[in-house]
Amino acid sequence: MPNSPAVPTVRRRRLGATLKRLRKAAGLNLDEAAATMGWIGPKLSKIENACQSIRPGDVTSLLKTYGVNDLETCIALENLAKDAGKKGWWQTYSKIVSPSYADYMSLESDADQICEWSPLLVPGLLQTSAYAREVITGITTSRTPEEVAALAEVRLARQSALTRPGKPLELWAIVHEAALHKRFAMRPGTMREQLQHLLDTSEMPNVTFQLMPLGSTAHPGVVGSFSMATFPQPTPDVVLLENVSGATYVEGDDTIPFAKAFERIRAAALPVEDSLARIAEMEEGHRK
């Protein structure tokens, strides 16, 4: 039975990009590699470009053709093929969650680590319910109050990745100090609660938080925010860029400049202990 047409989800793109890289490393062109499977080149091309699904067993056969014998690599790619079209818990909210947002949540559920630079907002993985509702209300142009509440639920549900069994997601978040000076007229206590939540969450061993001070030196982060997800080898990293028109994904080798930029942003930010001390001062100021 032929493979069914596939929507090019982030999981499929990661799998396709990895298989393409391994094929090239083995010195095979599309026709040569496809012939070992009894396929034609265009079929393998569709798989590599995330336009067609592939069975886990066929992934195993391709990896043998490419000379890949590492057990962890084989298991990781077989599981990626198995989960490529898998529906996550967020499908419950399919009427309000866009495909690009669903893609990002699948990244979070698979990733080993998220490195996030956020100059304007507290990252979603660290937001309180009240802060999430205020922010979503502020940035949306067409959501009903019920949809805002549901999106806030989704944002909090994403945070379960930080406490998932086995290997919780590692988060390294850097936020500009200016983002923590926002005021919420409808609920004045929102920011104080959010600051306390940052202090509480930072005690988790898999969460690292840094603050970019108002008087920081110039750094690559001045051009905008980004979030970089890293995965077990050999699957490539993925970077998310967001703006008012939606989300854009950067994948594979194109993520290297972002990794270098994050290192420079991290160096320009306050050390972790100083960051938390500053947040504690700000939280105390809200009590007065």
Image (tube, grey):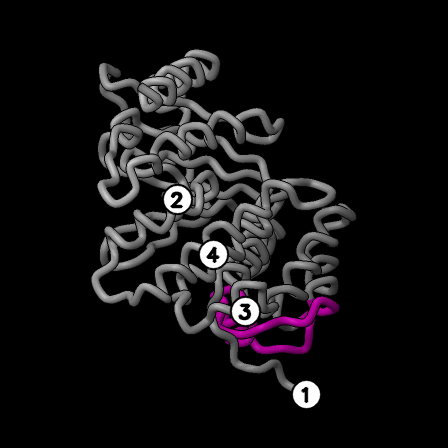
Between label 4 and label 2, give the one nearer the viewer.
Answer: 4
Query: What residue range appears in magenta?
Result: 36-58
In this picture, residue 35 sits left or right of residue 142: right
Query: Hey, what amino acid is under mark 1?
Result: Met
Q: Circle 4 — which element?
A: helix
Q: Is residue 42 above or below residue 225?
A: below
Give the structural element (helix, strand or loop) at label 3: helix
- The quadrant holding residue 277 is top left
Name the residue that disc number 3 marks.
47
Q: Position of residue 80 (x, y in %)?
A: 64, 59
Dot 1 corresponds to which residue? 1
**x and y percent of residue 126 in the render?**
46, 38
Q: Which of the 4 image quadrants contains residue 265?
A: top left
The residue that disc 4 covers is 153
Residue at image location 61% in from the left, 81% down from the top:
3
- Of the image marks 4 and 3, the number of the one nearer the N terminus: 3
Q: Considering only order in the chain, which callout, 4 or 1, is on the residue closer to the N terminus?
A: 1
Q: Earlier in the sequence, mark 4 or mark 2?
A: 4
Q: Which residue lies at the image location 57% right of the left edge and 82% below the top edge? A: 4
Mark sitting on residue 254? 2
Q: Is residue 270 visible?
A: no
10 Å crowding of disc 3: few (<14), some (14-19), many (20+): many
Type of amino acid at the residue the image marks with label 2: Asp
Q: CA distance from mark 4 to mark 2?
A: 33 Å
The answer to whether the residues at label 4 and label 3 have Cβ atoms under 8 Å apart is no
Eyeballing the image, is 57 above or below 213? below
Q: Of callouts 1 and 2, which one flags the residue occurring earlier in the amino acid sequence?
A: 1
